[in-house]
Image (spheres, rainbow, N blue to C red):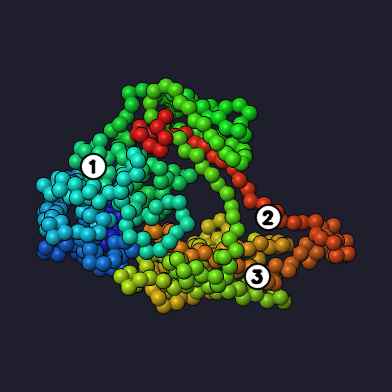
Amino acid sequence: MSLPWSQLSAFVLRCFLQARPFIDIDQDVLRDTAKWIVRHQKVNGEFQEPGRVLHSDLQGGTNNPVTLTAYIMSSLLGFPDKQHAYVIKSATNFLEDKLEEGISDNYTLALVTYALSWAKSTKAKEALNMLNERAEHQGEFRFWVTPASEISASWQPRSIDIELAAYALLSHFHQDRLAEGIPVMKWLSQQRNHLGGFSSTQDTVVALQALSLFAALTAASGTEMDVTVTGPSLKTPEMFSIDTQNRFLLQTKQIPPVQPMTMTVAAEGTGFAVFQLNVIYNTKHADQRLRSARKQEAFDLNVDVKDDKDDKNHLTLNVCTRYLGSGTAPRSGMVLMEVGLLSGFSVSPDFVPLDNTVKKVEKDNGKVNLYLDSLNETQVCVDIPAVRDFKVANIQDASVAVLDYYEPRRRAVRSYNSGVMQSVTPCDFCDSDCSLCHRDGSPALLRCSSLASFFWLLSVLHVNSLCTWVL
């Protein structure tokens, strides 16, 4: 049985405390969780982790006790009363001492600064000044970077960098240094994905919290604006109208793509809004085949298919993976294995055994997700039995992805297929009078298109902040 986790308990406690004004939360759950967390504080104010730290950026290096203490302390600060005042004071003294000794890691410094700022520590201003001195400047944006452990093709920054900027923005909020925080807010807003979130659960929760607090402070007295979008593929301009009645509603338009694509956005009126242009497309990477591991990947991943030409109703996927970590981080955080299934096949989670590594299995729209405690350099293999529910011809590749749950850019992806199922055509499903195929050897009528689909999506969502493009 796994040990309980202070870090995960603190995260749940933080979420429950933030949700309490809107939904009913059992007070006993909050009290008992906090009581359990407090029991793991040492005499010097430091918090310890009895279980394994799931968030890998909280677990590595000599800053681990400092980072974890700041993280847990910020969760306990969410209580409106003073029942944990002594615990928070003890943790504050510990963090202030560590700040005096020097904190080299930017992520740790951001968390410490946030905790001290919320606790109204006399050292909070010094910590934020130190953090701002390490910031990167790019035009009207300000942000921070951490040493990358791997190369990524993703346009988004690492999840830890999103969290770092969010904690910095929260620190500016708690210290009433709002003008200094606007360049950070603008950078954070620009990093959102097409769904409005970020890379992971952790960075999305913290970043939206920071942006929401700043949005509330920059509320406009009134909103009345019209946004006009023109482009070469539009016969007539697309119009968005935002007023006090619909300012919290998401408005979207789909625009046909042309090459080259030049969009012109104009706004008239008063208020603040976010304009976001999303480009969505599919590509097929030949270098993601079964065993073509790339040097910059965080995980080694092999996918083998065990099939039988005499039994087309069953096959087994053998997925083997291990963590390609460095000496400073020989073990990953929690790992998510996303197994896409071939068309027509399904997997029952009950047939994937749970063990010390695989903790949970769930189905999710054509794929099965496996949650792993963590991985190290030792290879772990999982057999996943699949059963054919529907007869499908010309089966295309599916993919398996292994990724760090809290840092999704740390991943590896492989595509796979069944040699047996690839050879199945519509002719195998019917008798000699089948109308779906030609027995004379001419191509089957059913084909799959290799063309990728492209579309553009415009969205305008009112928020009371200066984000992305100011309209």
Q: Nearer the viewer, residue 5 or 134?
A: 134
**Residue at position x 32%, y 57% in the image:** 146
Q: Within the image, what quadrant is residue 139 found in?
A: top left
Instruction: State yes or no: discs 1 and 3 in contact (Cβ < 8 Å).
Output: no
Query: Dot 1, how many residues are within 10 Å of its Cα: few (below 14), some (14-19), or many (20+)?
Result: many
Q: Quadrant of the N terminus?
A: bottom left
Badge nearest the viewer, 2 or 3:
2
Q: Earlier in the sequence, mark 2 or mark 1?
A: 1
Q: Is residue 258 left or right of residue 81?
A: right
The x, y position of residue 248, in whole percent, is 42, 32
* Residue to which mark 2 is pinned: 450
Residue 408 visible in the current orientation? yes
Q: Nearer the viewer, residue 222 or 127?
A: 127
Q: Is residue 81 left or right of residue 239?
A: left
**Residue at position x 58%, y 74% in the image:** 304
Q: Within the image, what quadrant is residue 215 found in?
A: top left
* Residue to which mark 3 is pinned: 418
The x, y position of residue 326, in whole percent, is 35, 71
Q: Is residue 83 left or right of residue 358?
A: left
Tell me the amino acid under the disc marked 3.
Ser
* Residue to which mark 1 is pinned: 172
Q: Is residue 54 left or right of residue 73?
A: right
SS category of the residue bearing label 2: loop
Q: Is residue 222 above or below residue 400?
A: above
Instruction: Kindly report the distance in space between the C-alpha atoms of the residues bearing marks 1 and 3.
Output: 55 Å
Q: Earlier in the sequence, mark 1 or mark 3?
A: 1
